[in-house]
Image: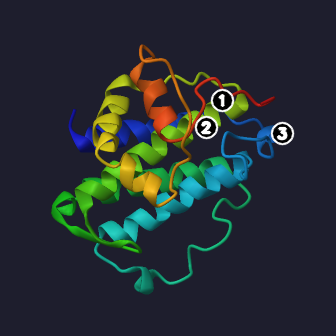
Amino acid sequence: MDLLEAYRRSLAEFIDRVDQIEPGQWSDPTPCSDWDVRTLVNHVVTEDRWSVPLLAGRTIAEVGDRLDGDQLGADPIATAREAAAQAEVAAAHPGTIDRTVHLSSGDTPAMEYLQQLLAEHLVHGWDVAVAIGAQPRLDPDAVHAAAQWFAGQIDSYRRNNLVHTGVQVPDDADEQDHLLAAFGRDPDWAPSD
């Protein structure tokens, strides 16, 4: 699957989950133990907002602190939709995929950054789904694209404490469960856990 198509699907799936959040669910727990639903969605919306200037070639210093704090405002669902739409436009802009992105971890090819964002949207989309009781199955082609990429990144992510370790799934588990476990998620997580 083409990277941009996989990224688009991950954005759409994340927003589909956000669209299902009921007013009383924003403070519900998520598989990210330090984050409730609102904090998790704010995290992804902030990533979407950051992606626009970064994919345009701006540096973190140029963006400054304007994306600090709450990005969701009074209408978090509409804000999430808008941020995802802007992120998709930025990613699909001609020439973007060939750029270098200036991340806090150093200069990174835009293709690598989009792979990171693809995985971010998939895994956090699953987080939202299980937190609110929505259908947690992810697009299998997008999962496959993310899993192929992450197989080469997992050691680095673990060394840098970017994912939790120790989650085991059976060898015959499907690719989604293996991807979730690689990102430190228990595929059987439920809000009462």
What type is the residue that disc 2 sits on?
Asp
Mark 2 or mark 3, which has the lower sequence index? 3
Q: What element carries label 1?
A: helix
Q: Mark 3 points at which residue?
A: 24
Residue 130 vs residue 154: left or right?
Answer: right
Colour scheme of the picture: rainbow
Circles 1, 2 touching at the beta carbon (< 8 Å): yes
* Percent position of residue 71, x then y: 63, 64
What type is the residue that disc 3 sits on?
Gly
Q: Is mark 3 on a helix, strand or loop?
A: helix
Discs 1/3, front: 1
| 3D distance between C-alphas at marks 1 and 3 | 15 Å
Residue 95 vertical placement versus 188 (above, below): below
Give me the disc on residue 35: none
User: To which quarter of the image does residue 105 belong?
Assistant: bottom left
Q: What element carries label 2?
A: helix
* Percent position of residue 191, x then y: 77, 31
Q: Which residue shows up at 36% across the image and 70% down it?
A: 54
Circles 1, 3 touching at the beta carbon (< 8 Å): no
Residue 15 can be seen in this image: no
Q: Mark 1 points at which residue?
A: 130
Q: Nearer the viewer, residue 33 or 161?
A: 161
Q: Name the residue under label 2.
A: 127
